[in-house]
Image (cartoon, rainbow, N blue to C red):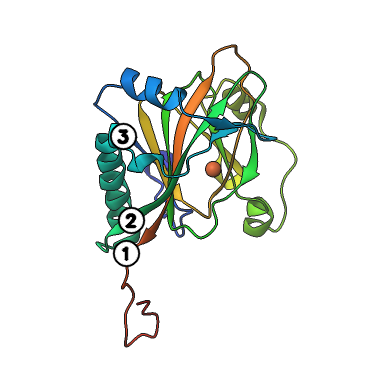
Amino acid sequence: MIDFDQVQRYTIFQIPPVHIYEYKGHIDSLYNYVMNLEYREKTDNATSKRLDILEHKELFDLKRFCSECVQHYSFEVCGSKNPIDIQQSWSNLANMNDGHRQHYHSNSYLSGVFYLRNDKTPIIFHMDGLIEKNFFSVLPEIAPDVQIEIEQGRKYLPSRSDTMAVPAQTGTLLVFSSRSSHSVPPNATNNPRLSIAFNTFPKLPFGNYESLHHIK
Ligand SMILES: [Fe+2]
């Protein structure tokens, strides 16, 4: 008999994970402040006209929280203690039917999204072509019992998925590699969805001089 419960599995490579950090401060005052900023309508969701909102004194504590979380991610995932600076920061306002098409964040190291108000809509991460890269052939059928578990949301097969829905709940910060492509489904409710997004870059100088990847 083979004991399949004892099978060893190595994660041989890893797509950069998404970290979710919970903010313990008060959300309502932040929500009111950000909601009352001026917004620019776009083809996707509206964005704040100001693109430096984490520099506003009203968001001082939130910026410190975001900075510490980014630093934690950089150390845990990338093994670096190099200081990371928050660069641009803006808010996203999605009213009914507003979503955000697939994109990634250019000229940024790590990105973050902090949710001031959200329904149950997740953020979707994409890795196009992942399945084709991993397997010579993709079997069309999924065993019926596995299919049922997938439909019921209990089972996820990362080896044959190129999208992943990550929960995006009010009061949480998601930190991820800026190169991780992501999208946000349309808001299906009457309740506006409001978030703050930001980009980062390592504080200069960084890299190793002798290894020829020093940036000053
Ligand atoms: Fe984004």
Which image quarter has ligand 1? top right
- Cα–Cα span, label 3 and label 1: 21 Å
Say what secondary structure mark 2 lies in.
strand
Furthest toward the top, the residue is: 190
* CB-based contact (under 8 Å), mark 1 and mark 2: yes
Query: x, y (%) of residue 60?
Result: 26, 37
Query: Which is more N-terminal, label 3 or label 2?
Result: 3
| Above-or-below relation of 87 to 120 | below
Q: Which residue is mark 1?
A: 203
| Above-or-below relation of 73 to 83 | above
Q: Which residue is mark 3?
A: 59
Whether residue 168 sits left or right of residue 55 in the image: it is right
- Cα–Cα span, label 2 and label 3: 16 Å
Judged by depth in the image, the label closer to the viewer, 2 or 3, is 3
Query: Which is more N-terminal, label 2 or label 1?
Result: 2
Q: Which corner quadrant of the image does residue 165 belong to?
A: top right
Residue type, numbered disc 2 = Asp
Furthest toward the right, the residue is: 140
Say what secondary structure mark 3 lies in.
helix
Whether residue 144 sits left or right of residue 123 in the image: it is right
Q: Which residue is mark 2?
A: 85
